[in-house]
Amino acid sequence: MTLSPLILLIEDDLQTRRFLKSSLHHRGWRTVGADCGKTGLALLHSENPDLVILDLGLPDMDGITVTRRLRQLSDLPILILSARNQEQNKIMALDAGADDYLTKPFGSGELHARLQALLRRVSRSIHSLEVFETGELKVDLARRKVFLSNHEVHITPIEYRLLSILIRHAGVVVTHRQLLQEVWGAEHIGDQHYLRIYMGHLRHKLETNPARPRYLLTEVGVGYRLALDDQFMSQDGPI
Amino acid sequence: MTYLLGVFLVASRYGRGASIVASLLSAPPFAFYFARPIFSVAIQDLENIIGLAVMIVVANVTGSLLEKFKLQTELARQRENHANALYRLSSDLSAAADHDAVARIAVEHIHAEFGAASVLLSVGADERLHPPAALASPVSLKIIDFTEAQRIFTTRKISQENHIGYYPLKSSRAWQGMLIIEASQTRSWQASERAAFLDTFCHLLAQTLERLQLAAQAREATLQAETEALRNALLTSISHDLRTPLTRIIGAANALIENDAEFSIAERQECNQLVLDEAQRMSELTGKLLDMARLSSGEIALHRDWNAIEEIVGSALNRLDKHLKDRPVRTLLPDSLPLLWIDAVLIEQVLVNLIENAVKYTPSGSPIDICGQAQDGFCRLTVADYGDGVAKGQESKIFDKFYRGVAESDQSGVGLGLALCKAIIEAHGGLIQASNRAGKGAEFVMTLPLREPPRVADPEVGGSL
């Protein structure tokens, strides 16, 4: 039997670390804790975790630096915990390579949904998918075709590229910067209006009510997230 | 008689000097052509001699009368001009909102009326003149000797030095500043008129400066009173809204510790749930307090970018999903709505607060409508509900900090939600208003200015859409 995933918790507040540990153990995950950036980076070497939960307000190093170091050493998923007034730091950390975020205070339900989506991505269950499905939305990744309730929806090449990036990160936030860079190139990183317009087109094609989307969720100020169906989550189960 | 008419005309046209010359010059031709013996300068008839003398006298008197009359007319015109100038000055000054505006108006009017460059120095709380921050107007006096000005100001006397006039300005209560004018050439007979005119000018300026000072003092006093009232409201509010959940949390946690053995699983679960709910409520409240503090301290800078309102509405509804379970939410956001140049995070907060309010203050199950509309360079966003509406006369009060419809009501919230909305919308140069709809329920309308969004140069535009 394979071991359950090991999660490295880099968080300076003892009580928060405790609560995270107990909540993760409850779901059958293993944890190892660090109370500062340096210890965290050291544990990355010695423990070889599957995922990092990183608090942005550490006493010794700022979260963005830790994220960069972690990214230099490995490409394991990083989930950031940020306080309300760290909006800009959060986005910088995401652009520096962190995979997703949670704003404090958060519930354990949100935490588990995020972790599952992140671990799924690593397990390559999505990379190797030929058909991606969530709710009524079905995307045939081999034939580059999109279906809604089994009816084919015609989308343009740019729309398809946006959608396929979101599918690659299904359940995980993708920042504006990442999308702009991948679809339009580095010279268009400042052109957020491109994204607004094409994501708008996609929403109008794929959502019943584009003002209350079910699949293409907006993370205001950060990016977009392709919602994973609950059913889809439970079918796969925890990894 | 022709002789008289000629002199009269000369007098009216060229003044007294010319008329005397004319009357004297015309005497010999009169004697030569008209008085007997004709064609001789000699005059034989006593009657004609007297006649000529009378005519010279009459011509002179008429001339001098005419000149006096002209002078009076000139003066009257001058006075009328001055009165008009003062009227223009006072109406311009009455609109002036600060010292800079007064300085600019003074300089421009003095240039227009006296053709002289000038500068207005205001006096600070330290009784010293303040050098102008920048040239108030292109016609400002460019170089001034500031030490000299300060010295003259302390003497409180009008003074003329090196072709520069210094006029300390005194209002009814205090010395308000000093006007410095470059001397200009004036005719001597105008000097006293000019001095009187300038005096009134200075008086008007002093009064305006005093008015500004009093207005600033009044503002400060009101602000202080408001701050005081706000502090009291905050204390009352915090003690109620933060202590209520705290009391419940402490109670529940105590019960869990003390009655651990006796509690059934259901009871324990209930206590835990209570702790969680109340803690979440506190988290929400402290978040709002924090946002308000940051907004009012000016710490929050707007991170504006091009945003689609549809996305922001979608995200707000997604965040409130739990609260909206039994609520039909109807959205009407036309595809034609342009992108808005806004801080999406803050505008989302506004929508969240408004929708939360609608949920809080209307019967469960009643719908909530969200509409967007672009018109005349503005985007109108409306959140409407089907509750009892806003109490009459309270439509603008509800946006005040710490306002609550019913004091000490069991509704949670520190009365900051709408105040936050107002601060955010106003930071965007927009407006937010509450009203009651003809049918039923309240309506919150935000108006945000539109900007021309950048073009998208893309091969796909007009593609398969």
Image: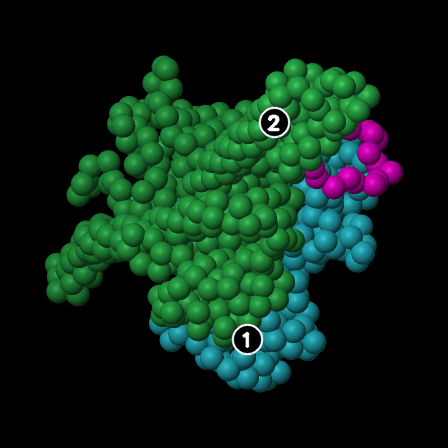
Say whether residue B120 is magenta.
Answer: no
Q: Nearer the viewer, residue B31 or B62?
A: B31
**What residue is drawn where x is 58% and y is 84%?**
A42
Q: Nearer the viewer, residue B112 or A141?
A: B112
Instruction: From the viewer's perspective, tell me whether residue B64 is left or right of residue B127.
Output: right
What amino acid does circle 2 point to?
Answer: Ala
Q: Position of residue A70 (x, y in %)?
A: 63, 75
Instruction: From the viewer's perspective, tell me whether residue B433 is left or right of residue B407.
Output: right
Quick check: do tags 2 and 1 share a chain? no
Mark 2 burial class by Cα count in 10 Å: few <14, some 14-19, many 20+: few
Mark 1, residue position: A62
- Quadrant (top left, top right, bottom left, bottom right) of the C terminus of chain A: bottom right
Q: Which chain is cyan?
A: A
Q: Which residues are magenta?
A: B452-465
- Colour in which chain B is drawn: green
Q: Chain of mark 2?
A: B
Instruction: From the viewer's perspective, tell me whether residue A5 is left or right of residue B211.
Output: right
Residue B258 appears in view:
yes
**What residue is drawn where x is 52% and y is 61%?**
B165
> In the picture, residue A88 is in which quadrant?
bottom right
What amino acid does circle 1 point to?
Answer: Asp
Residue B293 appears in view:
no
Dot 1 lies on which element?
A: loop
Mark 2, residue position: B53
- Quadrant (top left, top right, bottom left, bottom right) of the N terminus of chain A: bottom right
**What residue is drawn where x is 64% and y is 38%?**
B17
- In this view, B350 is above or below B225: above
